[in-house]
Image (cartoon, helix red, strand yellow):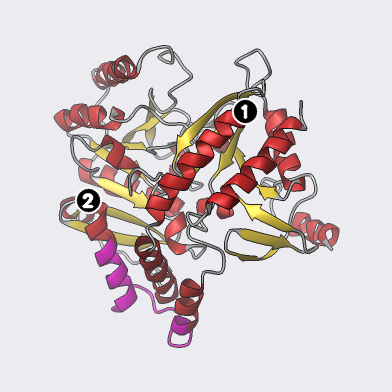
């Protein structure tokens, strides 16, 4: 049946639509932190639909909210008042940390970032954007134009002029050998130098932890130091929280809070986990920035009632069950366990991350050279061990990406670590 479905997939969908595994997997249902395929095989899910299944598969509170809302009305568009949309916007505005915040809902993180770019360039009357090397911000024409990862940027054409800044990858690049304070100082000096050569940009967009880039991040405080420079030049800060938001990093509810010494971002984007699989994205911005557009706009599907009902139920569950705290506790245990089991695996260069957002970077033994073949082999071996993980990284996709639902238990973390250890040993 899988072969038959794969043939149909190839016949009608684009060649560039990536599939994991040599023998692609059809997932038919899930529960908690587990999913099952069409052949009945059970897997521990350590990737959550690319960080979208944030709380749990088939979470009763979310499925109940979706079912009840579907029985009333599914959709009406933003041309009409929408109580679930207002209620979720109120919650997110209050939790964002951005003063006098306004919220606009979209259907994805890509669309959220696209909207943030429109707001920033309109507000600042500039089409110049600063972005981070190794970054990823989505699939739209403008989002691809600010993505600093060639594996996910299929065209150099763009409506924007993009300049790439140092700092998103702590352990590679020209400043890797510096201590944290000196690393930040060097990156800030580079930013200052760059701004001296160009017309004032509209904004800097940055992921607090780079997702597709392999869960890399700078030292805490880098973007706070950047913000001090940006504010002097009137440049906005856009925090892309599509993957880092909602407590996944454990230490903070938003990734930007690890860099918040000079205040919150001017604009923040979100998506993925808030919908627990439903299609929700959005932008939060200071009112003067959000309201800078001088023409009408709507969102046909952004903020539709059924997705807002899911988001509200999911957010309530997340907060009431302190899943941020669980990500901190269980994620901390999992990171230490992975570091212990990979200490004697020569293909593992680094285990990094925070909370339940963990990267394992693979290299050719004895070198700093990326090893995408090993990453692909471990992905396959982990599946055979009943574990689903992701992969990424700006250096030839050589990092394993681990991001389970935030309700992961200690026992499941141990089970996943054991499975990953066997997968890593199998490639030696």
Q: Residue at x 24, y 66 (%)?
A: 90
Q: Position of residue 229 (x, y in %)?
A: 20, 26
The residue at the point 53 percent across, 46 percent down is 403
Q: Is residue 148 magenta?
A: no
Task: Give the residue number, with chain letter if any, for mark 2.
Answer: 97
Left or right: 345, with 354 as reference point: right
Q: Position of residue 398 (x, y in %)?
A: 62, 30
Q: Residues within 10 Å of mark 1 (few under 14, many from 20)?
A: many
Residue 215 visible in the snapshot: yes
Q: Horizontally, is 426 left or right of 346 in the view? A: right
Determine the CA span between mark 1 and mark 2: 38 Å
**Which residues fall within the magenta stretch?**
68-91
Give the quadrant of the C terminus.
top right
Circle on res. 342:
1
Give me the residue at 28% from left, 71% from top.
87
Instruction: Report x, y in % for residue 375.
Output: 68, 33
Question: Residue extending furthest front?
Answer: 411
Q: Secondary structure at mark 2?
A: loop
In this view of the protein, which residue sits in the foreground, 21 or 266?
Answer: 21
Kindly indicate whether the residue at mark 2 contacts the one at mark 1 (C-beta within 8 angstroms): no
User: For the residue labelled by badge 1, is the local secondary structure a helix, a strand or a loop?
Assistant: helix
Task: Estimate how packed mark 2 is, as few (under 14), some (14 to 19) or many (20 or more) residues with alpha carbons within 10 Å.
Answer: some
Residue for point 22% across, 34% down: 235
- The answer to if 73 sits in the magenta stretch is yes
Quadrant in which residue 234 is drawn: top left
Does the rendering let one see residue 376?
Answer: no
């Amino acid at each position: 049946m899988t072969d038959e479905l794969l043939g149909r997939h190839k016949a009608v969908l684009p060649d560039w639509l990536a599939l994991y595994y040599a023998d692609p997997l059809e997932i038919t249902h899930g529960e908690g932190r587990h999913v099952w395929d069409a052949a009945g095989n059970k897997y521990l899910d350590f990737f959550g639909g690319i960080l979208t299944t944030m709380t749990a598969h088939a979470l009763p509170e979310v499925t109940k909210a979706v079912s009840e809302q579907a029985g009333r009305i599914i959709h009406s568009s933003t041309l009409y008042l929408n109580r679930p949309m207002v209620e979720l916007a109120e919650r997110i505005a209050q939790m964002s940390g951005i003063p006098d915040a306004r919220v606009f809902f979209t259907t994805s993180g890509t669309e959220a970032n696209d909207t943030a770019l429109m707001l920033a360039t309109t507000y600042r009357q500039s089409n110049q954007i600063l972005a981070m090397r190794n970054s990823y911000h989505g699939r739209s024409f403008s989002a691809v134009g600010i993505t600093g990862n060639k594996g996910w940027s299929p065209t150099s054409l763009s409506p924007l002029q993009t300049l790439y800044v140092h700092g998103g990858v702590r352990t590679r690049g020209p400043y890797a050998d510096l201590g944290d304070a000196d690393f930040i100082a060097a990156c800030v000096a580079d930013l200052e130098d760059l701004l001296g050569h160009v017309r004032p940009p509209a904004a800097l967009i940055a992921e607090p932890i780079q997702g597709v880039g392999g869960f890399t991040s700078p030292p805490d405080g880098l973007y706070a130091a950047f913000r001090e420079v940006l504010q002097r030049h009137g440049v906005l800060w856009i925090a892309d929280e599509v993957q880092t938001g909602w407590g996944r990093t454990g230490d903070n509810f938003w990734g930007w809070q690890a860099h918040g010494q000079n205040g919150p971002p001017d604009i923040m984007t979100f998506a993925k986990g808030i919908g627990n699989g439903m299609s929700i994205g959005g932008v939060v911005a200071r009112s003067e920035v959000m309201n800078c557009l001088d023409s009408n706009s709507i969102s046909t599907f952004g903020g539709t009632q059924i997705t807002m009902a899911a988001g509200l139920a999911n957010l309530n569950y997340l907060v009431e069950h302190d899943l941020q705290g669980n990500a901190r506790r269980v994620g901390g245990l999992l990171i230490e366990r992975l570091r212990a089991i990979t200490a004697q695996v020569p293909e593992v260069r680094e285990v990094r991350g925070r909370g339940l957002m963990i990267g394992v970077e693979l290299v050719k033994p004895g070198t700093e050279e990326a090893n995408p073949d090993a990453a692909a082999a471990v992905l396959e071996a982990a599946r055979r061990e009943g574990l689903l993980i992701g992969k990424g990284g700006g250096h030839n996709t050589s990092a394993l990406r681990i991001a389970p639902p935030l309700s992961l238990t200690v026992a499941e973390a141990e089970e996943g670590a054991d499975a990953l250890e066997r997968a890593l040993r199998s490639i030696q």
